Every structure is written in structure tokens, then in C-alpha cells.
Amino acid sequence: MNPTSSRRRNATLLYAVAIFLSSSLLFLIEPIAGKRLIPLLGGSAAVWTACLVFFQCALLLGYLLAHWFVTRTGPRVQAAAYVTLLVASIAQLTAAVDPNLRANTSHPVTSVLWLLALLIGVPFVTLSATGPLLQSWFARFRHAQMRDDGSSTAPQAYRLFAISNVGSLLALVVYPSLIEPRSSLHGQTATLAIGFALFGVVCGSIALSMRRVPQLPTASPTPVDTAPLDRPDDTRTDRILWISLAATGSVLLSAVTNHISQNIATIPLLWIAPLSYIWITIEAGLCEEVLYRAVLQTRLTAFFKSPWAGVLATSVLFALAHAPGLYLRGGAETHGSAADPIQVAAYTIAMLSPVSLLFGLLYARTKSLLLVVLLHGMVDVLPNLDDFIRTWL
């Protein structure tokens, strides 16, 4: 085996493990920290809503920190700062295994925010910053490999985001079903500290290796001719729109959690079930859009040397990919029985190609994968929204 190829494969695996651990720990640290507040403040809806507010704000702070590192500092400063955060996080988690906590019951919301900052403040921000920061490092790593040998077999950095989502969903499912019923809270906290130490070793090794990787150049290769679909510069209105859309999801999550805790049951982890359902539904759209838009449409556009041809061909392939599933389970037009394969293929092309064409044009026009993922998620969620509301709300 080529030593260079072996090193590249090992480095890619290291990034994948680090991303998976960061997302898993992020969604394990939330319920563990929240449960530690129950003896002090109880499990009322206000407590869990305040916990969600803290988690969302800390998550945003981690993203901002990663963005600042990537855009304002070099690789050496980024590596040193990130290692410092890892050391501080391990120190805080170790000290929080058996802390002496006190709460002011007359101001429960303030107490929740303060206690969570004492328990998991630095680790949570560090875990939040890990995903975008390591994806940026991985892109720089791939660029260095392409510069050295003219090609790179390492996967796209976007695939690390898919690994992150798998880790998050796995933690959401595993904690209430396996971890919480079988271990004490003290044991969960100690295990979390050990897991974070392992995570710190993996990420620390990546950070040390990044000190030898140069900064990405500002110049980029000449793109495929997409003049008819050129994307205009972002305006202040665009940025406000994206921030508002992101905030909408956080507000809805807090509102649904508060509603469930008040009107269904004050069970702290009850919100995991609807969150997992929404996550799986959106994840399907995410995976499909990464495959069809970010990979297939981009390459077909380069192959045909026309963005319009790339969009059209991708839309037809997108529809045909759904034909086997419709054929096996039957569709609304066949009342649950399989129809003729050619009929099913024609039906999927007629019904799904226009939707895919819309997604493709939006992606070609805006270059925003997030926009088409959100729209795809809405298309998947809305048909089942009535059943979801009847079940959970």
C-alpha cells in the first residue's frame, strides 16, 4: 500500500471519529446536565425551556468562535486556541463530577443558566465549535493533498456533517433507552468526563498536525461557466433572513418542548421522540440534497458545460431513483399494489422531476445547500404534519 495513501486514509478516519464523538457528546451532555438540576430546581417546564435556551445560545457562541478562528487567525493560532479549550473543558468536566451546587429557587431561570455555565459551559462551547472548525481544517488538509499529488481520494468535508448528524441522532436514541435507565447520574457524569478526555486526545492530535498545514490560498480555481445563474453578493437583508430562519427553528424547539412539558407530561426527555422524528425526516432531505445537488448536479454541470443541462439531468435521475420504492410498496395511484415498472417510472418522472427541478434551480442560483435542504425537509414533513400534531400536540 502506498504510504501517502495510507496516511491520508488514517487522517480522514481520525477526522470522522472526532466529528462523530463531538456530536455524540454534545447530545449526551445536554440531558445529563439537565438531570443534575432536578434535585435543585425540579423538572418543571420552565426549567427545561431555560435549559434549551442555554444550549441554543452556547451552540451559537461555539459557531461564532469557530467562524472567528477560521476567518481571522492562522492554523497555528487556531490549533493552540483549540487545544487550550480542550484542556479547559476537561478540567471543568473533571471538577463538575461531584460539585457543591446551590440554586436560588426564587429566580429559577437565572439559576439554570448559571449552574449550566458552571457545569458544562466551556465543554459545550468547545463541542459546538468542533464541527465547523474541523470541517474547515479537513478542507485545508484536502487542499494540501491536492497540491502535493494533483488529486485527493479523501471524501468531501460535507460528508463529515452527515457523520455528525448520525452521532447526534444516535445519542438522542441511546441515552433514554440504554444509558439513563442503567447507570446513576454520578456514573453518567464520570463516563462523560472520560469520553471527553478520549475526544480531547483525538482532536488534540488533529490540532497538532494542523500546525504544519499552510493557510488556504485566497485564489480559487476557475469555476464552470454559470453566467446565467450567477449568485449576487449577499446583502444585509439576506443575512438577516438567514439569521431569522435559524432562530425560528430554535424558537420552535423551545416552544414545542414547553408545550409538551406543560400539557402532556413533565417528563424531561419526552421531547426526544418528536425531535428524533423531525431529525430523521430532515436528514433524508439533507442526504439526498448533498448527493444530488452538491455532488451529482455539480459534476453533471461540469460534464455538459451547461448549468441548465446539469439541473435537468439531475432532476430526471432524482425522480428515477424514487421509482423502485414506489414500485415495491405501491403508490396512491395504485392503491398499495405494485404497478407496471414503466408506468411507475413515468409517474415518478412526471411527479418528482418538477420538484427536483425547482431545488436544482435554487441551488444553481444561490449556491446555498441549506436552502434546498430546508425546502426538501418541508416537502417531507408537511404531508405527515397532521399525524405528528395529533400525536404530540
Image (cartoon, grey):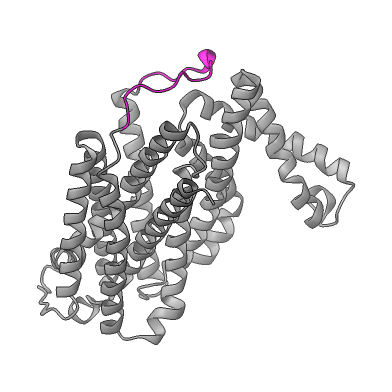
Q: Is residue 261 above or below residue 378?
A: below
Is 385 placed left or right of 137 in the picture?
A: right
Is 58 placed left or right of 291 in the picture?
A: left
Q: Residue furthest top?
A: 227
Q: Main secondary structure of the magenta part?
A: loop
Tell me which corner region of the image, top left, top right, bottom left or bottom right, holds residue 255.
Answer: bottom left
Residue 275 visible in the current orientation: no
Q: Any magenta on residue 228?
A: yes
Q: Where residue 139 sits in the image (x, y, percent)?
A: 39, 39
In the image, the segment drawn in magenta is: 216-233
Q: Where residue 357 sits in the image (x, y, percent)?
A: 63, 29
Q: Residue at x 51, y 37 (%)?
A: 372
Q: Give 260 or 231, whichever is nearer the viewer.
A: 231
Q: Is residue 55 above or below residue 107?
A: above
Q: Where residue 66 sits in the image (x, y, percent)?
A: 26, 44
Tell me which corner region of the image, top left, top right, bottom left or bottom right, holds residue 147.
Answer: top left
Q: Is residue 242 above or below residue 192?
A: above
Q: Any magenta on residue 307?
A: no
Is 136 placed left or right of 331 in the picture?
A: left
Q: Residue furthest right?
A: 340
Q: Residue at x 20, y 55 (%)?
A: 83
